[in-house]
Amino acid sequence: MSLEFSAQAKQRIERLLTQYPTAQAALLPVLHLAQEEFGHLPDEALHLVADTLKLPPAHVFGVITFYTMFHRENTGRNELMVCTNVSCMLRGGYEILRHIEDRLGIKAGQSTPDGCFHLVEEECLAACANAPMMICGPDYYLDLTPPKVDAILEDLRRRWREGARQLPTGGSSTGGASGGPGTKTMIGIGPGYKG
């Protein structure tokens, strides 16, 4: 079965194309939209994006394999990106990463069996002054300690469970906090959270 963008996604792509000088310049936001729409970027999604933007599929593939925010396979609904670059490393970034791994029973690059979390080790997330830190969706979690991480994980899991009870069965969704199967929930305490 070939993938197709929803009518809403097609409208969003048309708006995006008016905001960029070329279709190639609009590639990153369209890839984000495609990942939101389909949950990840399998080959069919890459070809759909390439056809939609009239770009070579090899170029689209090269872009999604360069950036860590694009996923070829389904990941957990809450993607936890933990920084382990120099500032975070010096202030306990690896300890935070190991704490999350122990707490969730997974390693970086894996998802929890229930699909609630996907854990990623990142190089730099641009919040060095508040290391150690992580991102989930659009939210930055700063000055992390194991107790703060525990509270964040509990809150994210609670919200995920509440959203899961409201999910429609089957099909794909165009995203949102309580979107359908395969979409990521963009939730958290809020930008600049310091706990």
Image (tube, rainbow, N blue to C red):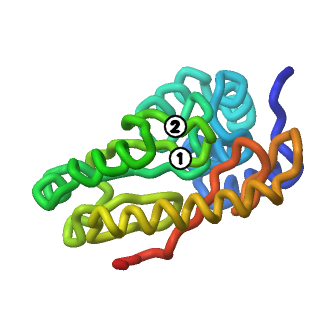
User: Do the numbered discs 1 and 2 sit on residues whose CB atoms are within 8 Å?
Assistant: yes
Height in image: 75 above or below 137? above
The residue at 40%/62% (across/down) is: 150
Q: Residue at x 26, y 71 (%)?
A: 143
Residue 177: x %, y % from top left: 70, 62
Give the crowd class for mark 2: few <14, some 14-19, many >=20 residues within 10 Å. many
Residue 48 placement, left or right of 195: right
Q: Position of residue 52 (x, y in %)?
A: 74, 36
Res. 111 mark: 2
- For the point 87% across and 39% down, the residue is 170
Q: Nearer the viewer, residue 182 or 105?
A: 105
Given the image, on which type of amino acid does mark 2 rest? Ser
Q: Which residue is mark 1?
A: 117
Question: In this picture, is 64 found above or below 86?
Answer: above
Q: Residue at x 37, y 63 (%)?
A: 149
Quadrant housing the C terminus: bottom left
